[in-house]
Image (spheres, rainbow, N blue to C red):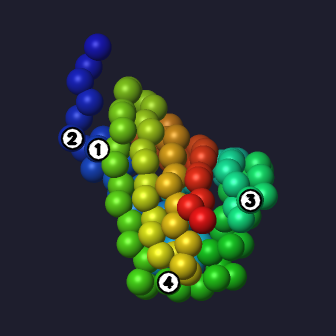
């Protein structure tokens, strides 16, 4: 078994940062390259369960707009070969706070998010 390379950690972090930067800037076009075309999202938003396409996230980011006061932290939980999981803490995004778990796959040599599971704090 081959050890995980530092470049994989850097590439996973760069992929997740496309998501966090898009949230801060309010532009989904920044995050779209980080996700696979058929990425999914699951979680409770304001008490309502959501499960479906990541496109709902793109729409929300564009509709809410910029949130420069938002703060984020990324913890790469594990990378095993071509699979990875990262935890993202997002605070004060338009007054909301979330913890996300992003599942990633290395597809054609590039890391992509295939699923986002989130918890919204009330």
Mark 3 sits on what residue?
Answer: 47
> Element type at marker 2?
helix
Between marks 2 and 4 in the image, the one whose residue lies nearer the viewer = 4
Q: CA distance from mark 2 to mark 4?
A: 31 Å
Nearer-N-terminus badge (4/1): 1
Q: Nearer the viewer, residue 50 or 112?
A: 50
Quadrant housing residue 82:
top left
Q: CA distance from mark 2 to mark 3?
A: 39 Å
Q: CA distance from mark 4 to mark 1?
A: 27 Å
Mark 1 sits on what residue?
Answer: 9
Mark 2 sits on what residue?
Answer: 6
Q: CA distance from mark 2 to mark 1?
A: 5 Å
Seen from this angle, which residue lies furthest top?
1
Q: Is residue 62 above or below residue 38?
A: below
> Element type at marker 1?
helix
Look at the image and tell me whether residue 56 can be seen.
Answer: yes
From the viewer's perspective, is 80 left or right of 116? left
Q: Nearer the viewer, residue 55 or 100?
A: 100
Nearer-N-terminus badge (4/3): 3
**CB atoms of marks 4 and 3 within 8 Å:** no
Picture quarter with the N terminus: top left
Mark 4 sits on what residue?
Answer: 67
**CB atoms of marks 2 and 1 within 8 Å:** yes
């Amino acid at each position: 078994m081959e050890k995980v390379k530092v470049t994989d950690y850097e590439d996973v972090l760069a992929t997740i940062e496309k998501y966090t930067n898009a949230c801060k800037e309010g532009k989904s076009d920044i995050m779209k390259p980080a996700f696979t075309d058929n990425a999914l999202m699951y979680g409770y938003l304001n008490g309502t369960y959501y499960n479906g396409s990541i496109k709902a996230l793109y729409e929300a980011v564009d509709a809410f707009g910029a949130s420069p006061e938002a703060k984020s932290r990324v913890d790469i939980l594990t990378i095993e070969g071509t699979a990875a999981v990262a935890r993202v803490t997002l605070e004060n995004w338009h007054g909301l706070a979330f913890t996300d778990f992003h599942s990633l796959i290395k597809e054609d040599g590039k890391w992509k998010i295939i699923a986002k599971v989130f918890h919204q704090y009330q």
